[in-house]
Image (cartoon, rainbow, N blue to C red):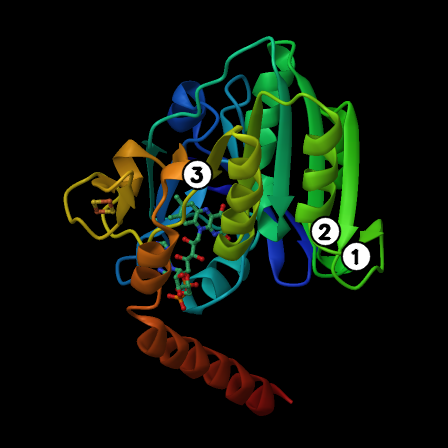
């Protein structure tokens, strides 16, 4: 059935992978596209990146990290449950070109949006070096998938529980000092992407990032996802989410992302409180 969850897998604490039946979206999907999902009539509209798509099977893959009320509800879905609607594919696809050496960098959940781009780059014959970083080993996702599309995969964890100890920026700097690199593609938390851009700027290397501005309609109508690129206003949902990282105004984006923090935290706490009281009643 359309929009139905076909498989569900837990990848890490609070991170779930869903394969969903969505033939029309899978048929048109390209790396860099995202969808906006709604669970039911009263649900918020949630933008999620296509972590993969299989046009022949009519499926899309979404990877969701529970960070608030809506993502908590999505991650409670079971096989056989359906989204009320899934809008997409949305956004401007990532421009996949060939004959390059590309360094892909994923921080935490960033591995999901990075994977389809690297997969497409690999198909075009690019040489790919990937750096995958997370806070700790149990939070690393997509290691096997990223290894399969990379000539070299470097893993970093902040606490040193797996791979090199430290941040992704350390191996990035080492690579740029010793190898000629044509493009860097960095996807992850805002501070990570900003730190990567500060390094690549010194080497004058083209750097693309994927921005998670707060979105409402996802189609360029509401203005909610406005970001400043090279001093010009752009909409993340239609002009992005992939942008030239060296041109992004990270300060403004950081400020805009905090707009609804108090309300979001209150909604999540209410949801968690309701779950706890349900458990008490069952027990
Ligand atoms: C283009 C794009 C692709 C994304 N892809 C993924 C993905 O593949 N997997 C994934 O887990 N998350 C993804 N996100 C982030 C995801 O949309 C948010 O985590 C989700 O909307 C949070 O909703 P919530 O109710 O659970 O949390 P809330 O408590 O409402 O919000 C928590 C934080 O999530 C962000 N957020 C909240 N609402 C939105 C919104 N409408 N649009 C964007 N960000 C929001 C804000 O930073 C906020 O502080 C993506 C966001 C964008 C813009
Ligand atoms: S989400 Fe409304 S303009 Fe982008």
Residues under numbered marks 2 and 1 in contact, where contact means CB atoms less than 8 Å apart: yes
Side of 88 where 189 appears, left or right? right
From where the camera sits, is residue 19 visible?
no
Which part of the image, by quadrant, shows the C terminus? bottom right
Q: Residue at x 29, y 61 (%)?
A: 256
Q: Is the CB of mark 1 within 8 Å of ligand 1?
A: no
x and y percentages locating residue 219 in the rendered image: 22, 38
Q: Of label 1 and label 3, which has the lower sequence position?
A: 1
Q: Secondary structure at mark 3?
A: helix
Estimate the spatial distance between the alpha carbons at disc 1 and disc 3, rounded to whole Å. 27 Å
Q: Nearer the viewer, residue 193 or 223?
A: 193
Estimate the spatial distance between the alpha carbons at disc 3 and disc 2, rounded to whole Å. 24 Å
The residue beneath circle 3 is 245
x and y percentages locating residue 154 in the rendered image: 78, 39
The residue beneath circle 1 is 137
Q: Residue at x 44, y 38 (%)?
A: 245
Residue sticking out furthest to the left: 221
């Amino acid at each position: 059935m359309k929009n139905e969850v076909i498989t569900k897998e837990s990848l890490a604490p609070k991170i779930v992978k869903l394969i969903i039946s969505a033939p029309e979206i899978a048929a048109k999907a390209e790396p860099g596209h995202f969808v906006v999902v709604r669970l039911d009539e009263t649900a918020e509209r949630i933008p999620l990146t296509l972590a993969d798509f299989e046009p022949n099977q009519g499926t899309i893959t979404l990877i969701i990290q529970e960070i608030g009320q809506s993502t908590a509800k999505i991650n409670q879905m079971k096989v056989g449950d359906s989204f009320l609607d899934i809008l997409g594919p949305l956004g401007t696809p990532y421009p996949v070109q060939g004959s390059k050496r590309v360094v892909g960098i994923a921080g935490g959940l960033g591995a999901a949006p990075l994977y389809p781009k690297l997969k497409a780059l690999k198909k075009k014959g690019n040489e790919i070096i990937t750096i995958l970083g997370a806070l700790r080993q149990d939070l690393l996702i997509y290691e096997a998938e990223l290894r399969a599309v990379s000539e070299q995969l470097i893993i970093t964890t902040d606490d040193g529980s797996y791979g090199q100890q430290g941040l992704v920026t350390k191996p990035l700097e080492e690579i740029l000092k010793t190898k000629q690199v044509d493009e860097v593609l960095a996807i992850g938390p805002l501070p990570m992407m900003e730190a990567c851009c500060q390094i690549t700027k010194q080497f004058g290397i083209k750097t693309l990032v994927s921005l998670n501005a707060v979105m409402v309609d996802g189609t360029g109508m509401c203005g909610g996802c406005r970001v400043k690129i090279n001093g010009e206003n752009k909409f993340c949902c239609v002009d992005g989410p992939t942008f030239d990282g060296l041109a992004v105004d990270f300060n403004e984006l950081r400020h805009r992302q905090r707009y609804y923090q108090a309300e979001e935290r209150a909604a999540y706490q209410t949801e968690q409180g309701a779950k706890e009281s349900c458990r008490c009643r069952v027990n």
